[in-house]
Image: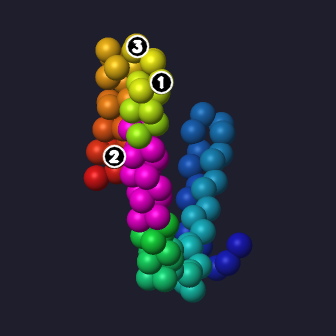
Amino acid sequence: MSASAPVTTVAVGGVVVVTHVIPAPQAAAPQNSPQENKISWVQLVGLGTVQIVVGLMVFVLGIIKIRCGYTLEFQSGAFVWEAACFITVDL
């Protein structure tokens, strides 16, 4: 232990509790650099773009399935709601 660390000693009911407080190092590295934030932003924009494209593909494939005779998706509108969820969650 260093000489500058504060020490607290408490005796309660025959039990001695010694507490040492160790200070944090002074030369700590910064948590987030501006370059890391920029990379994260670019990755998020790319992920959002992929999500919009997936939503459009769900919509187009739903229309194709309806043209092939799948009436349940037309009646429920599932392909529209799925595509809307993919696209609007990103915005």
Which kind of residue does numbered mark 1 sit on?
Answer: Cys
Of mark 3 and mark 2, the one earlier in the sequence is 3
Of mark 2 and mark 1, the one earlier in the sequence is 1
Q: Kindly identify the residue that appears in the image at 45 percent across and 71 percent down.
A: 42
Spatial distance from mark 2 to mark 1, Cα to Cα? 25 Å
Drawn side of residue 41 relative to residue 28, left or right: left
Spatial distance from mark 1 to mark 3, Cα to Cα? 12 Å
Which kind of residue does numbered mark 2 sit on?
Answer: Ile
| Front-most of residues 60 and 31 | 60
Which kind of residue does numbered mark 3 sit on?
Answer: Leu
Q: Main secondary structure of the magenta part?
A: helix
Residue holding disc 2: 87
**In front: label 1 or label 3:** 1
Residues shaded magenta: 44-59
The colour scheme used to paint the residues is: rainbow
Q: Position of residue 11 (x, y in %)?
A: 59, 45
Residue holding disc 1: 68
| Front-most of residues 8 and 38 | 38
Few, some or many residues within 10 Å of mark 1 (<14, 14–19, 20+): few
Residue holding disc 3: 72
Spatial distance from mark 3 to mark 2, Cα to Cα? 22 Å
Q: Which mark is residue 46?
A: none
Q: Are marks 3 and 2 in contact (CB under 8 Å)?
A: no
**In front: label 2 or label 1:** 1
